[in-house]
Amino acid sequence: MKHWWAVVLAVGVTALGTDVIPLSEVRPGMKGYGLTVVAGTEIARFDVEVVDILDEPGEANDFIIVRAYGDAIARSGGIAQGMSGSPVYLDGRLAGALSRAALWSAEPTRPLGLVTPIEAMLKVLAEVKAELPPPPEQEIPLPEGKKLQAWGIDRVRLVAAEPATVDEGTLVTWPLSAPVMASGLSERALSVLRDGLDLRAKPTPLASLITAWRGKVPGLLALGVPRVMAAPSITGQTPALPFVPGAPVGVGLVVGDVTVGALGTVTMTDGDVVLAFGHPFLFTGPSRYFLTESYVFDTVAALDAPYKFGALADVRGGVFADRWAAVGAVVGRTPAGIRTEFVVQDQGRGTRSELRATVVDEPRLSALLLYVSGLEAVDRALDRIGPGTAVVQYTITGRGMPRPLTRENVFLSTEDVAAYVPWEAAIVADILAYNEFQDPELTGISFTATVYPNFVAAEVIDLATEQDEYAPGDTVQFIVTVRGWRGKTEEWEGEIVIPADIDTPYVELRAYGGPRLRERGEGAPTFASLEDLIAYIEGIPTYDTLTVELFAVDPLSDLMCEPWLYGVDALSDRIPGTVVYGEVSLILPLTPKG
């Protein structure tokens, strides 16, 4: 059974109301034109001439090799990032989308480009299947009779980025990609967006809940984005072109007071359906990105690679396919995303700042985007990078969650308190996104923080008991001494019972602040449902918690080397808004009951 797009192309008429030319009819020497925006709202026309055709088994490596020329190309300094998706027409029919730039040693200044054929792109509209990516580098020998051989080219190499040098006889091509423009972010928030986030950088019990293959959340550069740069915010201010072939288009990851997304070009439309880029964005297959209008300020003829400089504008729909040959979107159908609200109170200046943005619900990216948005919110409120104490409360909701997750905590830093404020919420969002039970379908994060310029802290400095030796079944009465930061010393009294059936040569009594990591004698927590996981996260001690805990020795551990301890019982109390730190312990030998 033939698919509709195969039937349409076989008879050579129209597809989706657009005249198309299949790869089988393209010949070297054919001339045509492409459409793109170099600056402003004018769609510029550039000339193309077919140099040769790459028709490999399958479709992943099928391309039309063209020479691009004309005023638009000259002004851009060549084929620029952001031109990806620019429609190319031959004999008045749509042949495909400009998708890769190329160089060859004999004429490095005459831009060649590769066009993704329209056949592969049309499959994206129907969402029939996902194309498999080729290896990062692949060399294709040219069969006899190719016109490129008359130029001294006998092989084509597909690489991930523009090469520093080009071997003789080789046409080297690389994806044009889509530069990412970010509006409303400081340079350091942009830096995190580019480079990623290490969720395990700070020791916490939450780290043990992060899926084993996670930890370092990749930044956009590691995901193949060529550039991540700051751009002005133009939402609702600058008129943008409608989605027509050659017009700029945005694929949004964050929209609102902060905007992050990729800039490309529309290849073709069919009613509310938009086909663009001519290559993948992040290659997620099914996707839930935002389709936005965009505006091109100018095309920069940079020394490394030309690129379009622009900004994303208003949301107009959603991008639901991110495939090898193109991205596919629908106007008027916008994904829900994760609605975030950050409210930050700076007690030092008595000011309050709010930031609202919607982040795509994409597990690979959501934690990074939430952290970047939260960091920007705190930086805006504080207008400084420095020490302080932050009291944080956040609630995470989702359509697939049995109930909202709510948690409070307090953080202190001697160098950069803002970096800590959104960190835990980002970890928890990532844990929920990758939980083993069900898709949480995250819908929102409500986040409030109060930041103090001074240190609000207390140190555990002493732990004392009435006796030096105990027996199973005894009650241990203790006194914990805590000293406030540059303040007075206070004592906390309590008692804890040693189990009568305990089998251990001694017990350890430990007083400490905040959460603790799992001891070697303790097994990992187990959960039967998402509700269990949520309850466990909410119950992890916060950094303003003082705990006195009794530990016993695992009988299977080696006492001569490193005894394995496990927690027996604990008493905890909170000192709200105060970071409790430090640890003091006592070893209490056990003697049998007389």
Image (cartoon, rainbow, N blue to C red):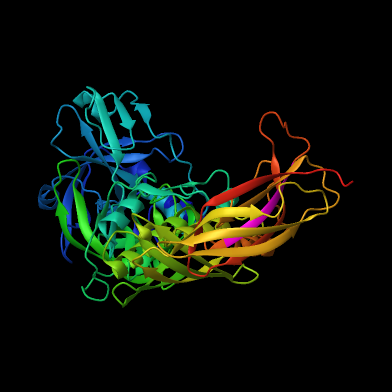
In which quadrant of the rendered view does residue 514 lie? bottom right
- Say above or below: 208 vs 250: above
Horizontal side of 471 relative to 121 (left or right) equals right
User: Magenta stretch: residue 547 in it?
Assistant: yes
Q: Tell me what residue is drawn at x 48 percent, y 41 percent.
A: 132
- Say above or below: 159 vs 310: above
Q: Tell me what residue is drawn at x 17 percent, y 56 percent.
A: 45
Let me know if residue 1 appears in the view: no
What is the chief secondary structure element of the magenta stretch?
Answer: strand
Q: Tell me what residue is drawn at x 14 percent, y 49 percent.
A: 73
Horizontal side of 515 relative to 238 (left or right) equals right
Q: Position of residue 139 (x, y in %)?
A: 36, 27
- For this orientation, the residue located farthest to the right is 594
Q: Position of residue 105 (x, y in %)?
A: 18, 27
Q: Of residues 176 and 415, which is closer to you in this image?
A: 415
Let me know if residue 251 appears in the view: yes
Q: Position of residue 520 (x, y in %)?
A: 66, 41
Q: Position of residue 291 (x, y in %)?
A: 37, 65
Q: Of residues 260 and 484, which is closer to you in this image?
A: 484
Magenta span of residues: 546-553
